[in-house]
Image (cartoon, coloured by chain):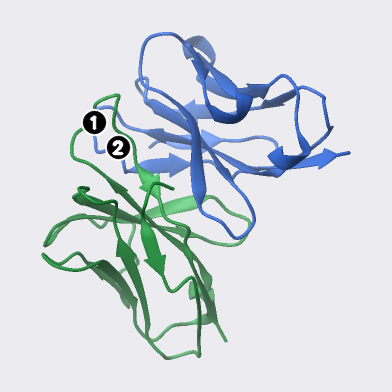
Chain colours: A blue, B green
Amino acid sequence: AQSVTQPDIHITVSEGASLELRCNYSYGATPYLFWYVQSPGQGLQLLLKYFSGDTLVQGIKGFEAEFKRSQSSFNLRKPSVHWSDAAEYFCAVANRGSTLGRLYFGRGTQLTVWP
Amino acid sequence: NAGVMQNPRHLVRRRGQEARLRCSPVKGHSHVYWYRQLPEEGLKFMVYLQKENIIDESGMPKERFSAEFPKEGPSILRIQQVVRGDSAAYFCASSPPGTGAGNTIYFGEGSWLTVV
């Protein structure tokens, strides 16, 4: 069965510092990979997605993620964090050949940004 | 989000009452999904519907929960005889058909159900 692991429940960084949020998945083949962000009381916004091709994916708000097949990872990065980035971040996967809407989510990583 | 509309945004129900959550997908999207987010957890898939059809309900609790997506009107997630454990955020998402790289799914802003 597919599973998504976000090992860090809570991360705190200073504004302007770099950020990396980890995501590992368990699946027999390379799935579709996503990162979503959720602000308190809000829905999910798609940051970026990986389907195929270049393993370094650029997203919105200055985020990027790198797919590493050998490590079954899809870590999210940002070189300089802004206070408005404080939110919860979810990694998700979908099976290739299946409907895109059938996603498996990690538990999320809560990001706190110190001024 | 890109136009998935959910209502109500917040709903309070007493134990034993019914909760109805509505979802209007992005215009032109024929696939609707419902997810539940329990406190301190990620989203869990519940059900996948197309117009007038339930495609995958493997994530739906066996009792008290039902979903529909009629030919006309929004998709409805119905919870009968609610219990405190049903308190959660319920998210609807929609997508166009197909799994091409240009497609993606869009989430609504969620409906927060509180059972008192």
Chain of the residue under the numbered disc 2 shown in the image: A
Alpha-carbon neighbours of circle 2 within 10 Å: few (<14), some, or many (≥20)? many
Q: Quadrant of the N terminus of chain A?
A: top left
Q: Secondary structure at mark 1?
A: loop
Is residue A10 in view from this perspective?
no
Q: Amino acid at mark 2?
A: Leu
Q: Residue at x 22, y 48 (%)?
A: B29
Nearest the viewer among A51 and B66 is A51
Residue B86 in percent (x, y) is at 48, 74
Q: Amino acid at mark 1?
A: Thr
| Apparent side of residue A32 relative to residue A20 in the rendered image (left or right) | left
Any mark on residue A100, and which?
2
| Apparent side of residue B54 relative to residue A37 in the rendered image (left or right) | left
Nearest the viewer among B106 and B40 is B106
Q: Mark 1 to mark 2: distance in Å?
A: 6 Å
Residue B77 in percent (x, y) is at 31, 70
Tell me, yes or no, whether the two marked residues, 1 and 2, touch with CB atoms within 8 Å.
yes
Q: Secondary structure at mark 2?
A: loop
In the rendered image, which residue does mark 1 sit on?
B99
Depicted B14 relative to depicted A96: above or below: below
Depicted B92 relative to depicted A54: above or below: below
Q: Quadrant of the C terminus of chain A?
A: top right
Alpha-carbon neighbours of circle 1 within 10 Å: few (<14), some, or many (≥20)? some
Q: Residue at x 43, y 83 (%)?
A: B82
Chain of the residue under the numbered disc 1 shown in the image: B
Q: Residue at x 19, y 64 (%)?
A: B69
Residue A81 in percent (x, y) is at 75, 29
| Apparent side of residue A114 relative to residue A34 in the rendered image (left or right) | right
Residue A19 in percent (x, y) is at 73, 25
Any mark on residue B52, and which?
none
- Farthest-out residue, right: A115
